[in-house]
Amino acid sequence: MRDDTTGGMLPSLWDDARAAAMTEAERLLYRSNLLGSDKRITNYGGGNTSAKVSERDPLTGETVEVLWVKGSGGDVGTIKMDGFATLYMDKLRALKGLYRGPDHEDEMVGYLPHATWNLNPRAASIDTPLHAYVPAIHVDHMHPDAVIAIAASAESRELTRRIYGDAIGWLPWRRPGYELGLMLEAFCRENPEAKGVVLEAHGLFTWADDARGCYETTLWAINEAIAFFDAQDSPAFGGPDRDSLPPDARRAAAARLMPAIRGMVSGAQHMVGHFDESDTVLEFVNSRDMERLAALGTSCPDHFLRTKIAPLVVPGDGDADAALAALPDAIARYRDRYAAYYDRCKHTDSPPMRDPNPVVFLIPGIGMATFAKDKATARIAGEFYVNAINVMRGAEAVSTYRGLPEQEAFDIEYWLLEEAKLQRMPKPKSLAGRVALVTGGAGGIGRATAERYLREGACVVLADISADALEEAGQALSDDFSRDVVRTVQLDVTDEAAVAAGLTRAALEYGGIDILVSNAGIASSAPIEDTTLELWDRNMSILATGYFLVSREAFRLMSAQGIGGAIVFVASKNGLAASPNAAAYCTAKAAEIHLARCLALEGAPKGIRVNVVNPDAVLKGSRIWQGDWLKERADAYGKDAAGLAEHYRDRSLLKREVLPEDIAEAVYFLASDASAKSTGNILNVDAGNKEAFTR
């Protein structure tokens, strides 16, 4: 899937045999998914589709005309049947009698629920009138980069005429809403032969009376624009002004910059980052005209809502040290400019100023970073700015690029209808915006912990030495919680370079980390006279040195962010209570616990909390029980392997089995704000063992 405006024509993917068995509404869904499958046609969440369908009225049994239209907040590429709003066309037409003019168009949204067919709970979007009043059965509204490049040009109207003749018309900029729906209807009535219209600074509308015809008209309109731009021959963005750093140096620089940026923009809430070093981005950030164009902002409303009034160009010209030194002042100036923009443009009823921090950071020589409340939003913001780059490339090749006028941009960003939608959003989960790295992440406790964190809105980097187990765990969690919030890194905690690389990966993928769960482990059992130096060193290497190495890198990363953090060691009851035939293991676990106490002292001034969870006898899902450890511990207690779980349960004060989920709950508590005033603590989750009482 390409992300640029050119590069070959869009092929028709329509399958008549498949579509023949579908209802009209199902063909709408089929068409929508086809259109949304290619970013050259529309971006994520952008655009909408509709069909006017004959349906049975559930009350009268009569056949009525129903508008099926993509509901508010949906995405045409992934939409299902329940993603469409359904409204009676006769009631939508009747709304014209209630319309009081452009100054009152927002109130028309409140009438849309009264037109709902079949009690459909899917909310209709602000674009519903644009689809309802086009006198065609099928309507597409897309945001293709190639067409928006025309729409955002100074000579937008002339270019539209030059490329499409009378087949595609043109309408001047108007914020989406009821008035634009009436303008579109009037255009269709006055130009009955037209197949569509370019909306200035916005996008493309096309229509037809059958689903395939509408789909292929949309492709035709986009392909005409692509062909037009393919024929141009001018350097993009005024040509290159600097070179990119080599790939490894680029990523190393980004891994240093992103935690610092993340810390600076995470005042009101923790932000999650996304890094893009694609050819499209690098061409733009290294170009001669980048700063001029970046200052103009985006044009399409969908782009603007995701990327803010303008990006921040990071000073330093690709030098990470210079950029780090300049960033605090650069971000402070951006906030001041944003506050001034708000004050210039606000109305008496405007919502309060939102977060004044930038979303998009353009880094010459390195790439682009985007930050938002969660990974998906940060990634999509980056994708939208890539769309904006493509639009600027095309517009500048044939004309002059124009962003939205400042007041129009503000009126979209602070639209009361948009504010109402934001107010309806559910309360953030307890770990929203947090990033956790879990070592031993593919084992029973690590995986249960990752799942617990993911349920609370965190992003998780699973680290484990076993490639196969890591792949299986990562895939399962991605399937359950989405690819955006799960990353995997194969990691040997005893390898200093590998540990540093693993934390660098977290910085590149998410902007940093807030939570470290140090859980990598082994188990061994042998009488002291049979304990080899190799066995002793192996326990110390993984359970003491490994915890030190991972914690040290986490401290460095958390310190660079400057927003605190939480470190949780998964140690063991054996770190407090000696066990027979396990001197190496018990001693290494005791070292873990004391290391945590030391780190709690050092971390407190930085807001980094360090605590310990001590499990005992967690057999379910644990890989350490899959080898000799099970037999060795059974032998140590004079039991057979089958009876060991019962032995552990019966020796506990509560007579209960300890499960990975029990440990995960404790590890969640110590990373959450519920334990914000706790550091240097030990929480035993062992069903009660008096020898392990801490006092």
Image (cartoon, rainbow, N blue to C red):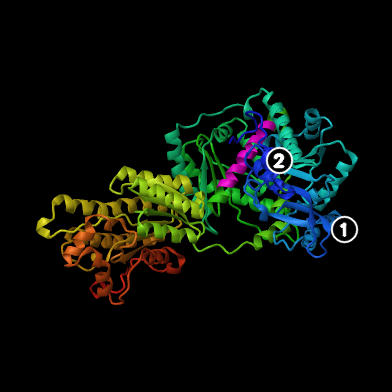
Q: Where residue 213 sits in the image (x, y, percent)?
A: 76, 38
**Earlier along the polypeptide chain: callout 2 or callout 1?**
1
Residue 84 shown left or right of residue 1 in the figure: right
- Location of residue 387 (image quadrant): top right
The reply to whether residue 152 is visible in this rendering is no
Quadrant housing the C terminus: bottom left
Question: Which secondary structure lies at badge 2?
Answer: loop
Tell me where residue 302 appears, x and y as whole percent.
Answer: 68, 47
For residue 403, the mark is: 2
Residue that label 1 marks = 94
Residue 606 highlighted magenta (yes or no): no
Is 280 located above or below residue 378 in the figure?
above
Quarter of the picture holding the N terminus: top right
SS for callout 1: helix
- In this orientation, which residue lies closer to the viewer: 660 or 316? 660
Q: Can residue 455 be seen in this snapshot?
A: yes
Please tell me how crowded label 1 is: few (under 14), some (14-19), or many (20+) other residues with Cα within 10 Å.
few
Residue at image position (36%, 46%) is: 468
Q: Main secondary structure of the magenta part?
A: helix
In the image, what residue occupies the spot 36% across and 63% down?
660
Amino acid type, mark 1: Ala
